[in-house]
Image (tube, helix red, strand yellow):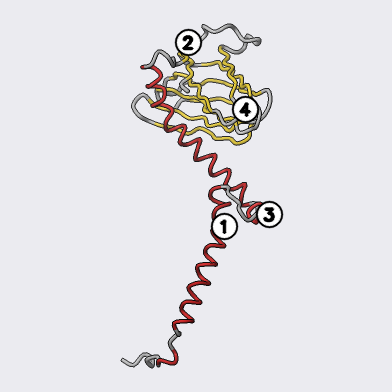
């Protein structure tokens, strides 16, 4: 079947044209990498164009969420190591054993201070279907938060995530038996003291990170 004429030598690009096209493609790729990809994916903006196009903020959010996810994944292992090492004890206390909060409506209160970029995690031991009411606040700065659960049989649940928050009040219903609670990371440039108050159906409050 006849499709088309074979190109002649004159129709083919010269070596100089191929080299020129290759250099243009490399330069374009490098420009896109510096101006678009690095700001949008990693929050790195060497040209300043990413900030103008609001791409740098997108990259910073992605990087922060990745760090929070990594911290969440490593938190259970960290808790096991702490249990085994007396020099770094896990903070555990039976529900209701802490001093009563200012408001008698709350069953337990936990207060901790996070330096810039520092993270912490507090969990409630709950059975499937149990519900706890909570609120947490900070005195200054802002935190990224991740409310999630780790089941006794390996199950995992993600209830909510927040960025640059100063306070949250809501209810938590356990999807399965296990530890359910909050991971915070201080993304401000000042020390932030977070106060968590809880009440409802749970058997224990513990800090695991």
Which residue is under mark 1? 34
Sequence-earlier tag: 2 or 4 = 2
Is 29 situated above or below 187?
below
Label 3 packing within 10 angstroms: few (<14), some (14-19), many (20+): few
Q: Secondary structure at mark 2?
A: strand
Q: Disc 1 versus disc 3: distance between alpha carbons?
A: 14 Å
From the image, which quarter does the N terminus lie in? bottom left
Question: Which residue is depicted at the point 41% across and 19% down?
Answer: 82
Is 185 situated above or below 4?
above
Sequence-earlier tag: 1 or 4 = 1
> On the image, which quarter does residue 14 sit in?
bottom left
Which residue is under mark 2? 93
Q: Disc 1 versus disc 2: distance between alpha carbons?
A: 51 Å
Sequence-earlier tag: 1 or 2 = 1
Which one is in front in this view, the residue at disc 2 or the one at disc 4? 2
Whether the residues at callouts 2 and 4 have beta carbons within 8 Å, the answer is no
Which one is in front in this view, the residue at disc 2 or the one at disc 3? 3
Q: Secondary structure at mark 1?
A: helix
Which residue is under mark 3? 52
Question: Which residue is depicted at the point 48% across and 19% down?
Answer: 207
Label 2 packing within 10 angstroms: few (<14), some (14-19), many (20+): few
Q: Disc 1 versus disc 4: distance between alpha carbons?
A: 38 Å
């Amino acid at each position: 079947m006849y499709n088309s004429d074979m190109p002649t030598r004159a129709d083919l690009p010269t070596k100089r044209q191929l080299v020129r096209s290759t250099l243009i493609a490399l330069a374009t790729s490098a420009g896109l990498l510096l101006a678009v990809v690095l700001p949008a994916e990693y929050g790195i903006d060497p040209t300043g164009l990413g900030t103008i196009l609001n791409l740098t903020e997108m990259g910073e959010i992605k990087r922060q969420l990745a760090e929070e996810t990594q911290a969440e994944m490593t938190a259970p292992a960290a808790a096991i190591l702490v249990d085994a090492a007396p020099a770094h004890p896990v903070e555990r206390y039976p529900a209701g054993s802490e001093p009563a909060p200012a408001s008698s409506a709350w069953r337990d209160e936990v207060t901790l201070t996070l330096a810039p970029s520092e993270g912490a995690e507090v969990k409630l031991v709950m059975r499937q279907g149990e519900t706890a009411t909570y609120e947490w606040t900070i005195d200054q700065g802002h935190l990224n938060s991740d409310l999630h659960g780790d089941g006794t049989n390996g199950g995992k649940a993600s209830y909510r995530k927040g960025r640059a928050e100063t306070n949250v009040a809501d209810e938590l219903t356990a999807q399965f038996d296990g530890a359910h609670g909050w991971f915070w990371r201080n993304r401000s440039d000042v020390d932030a003291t977070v106060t968590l108050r809880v009440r409802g159906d749970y058997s224990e409050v513990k800090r695991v990170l």
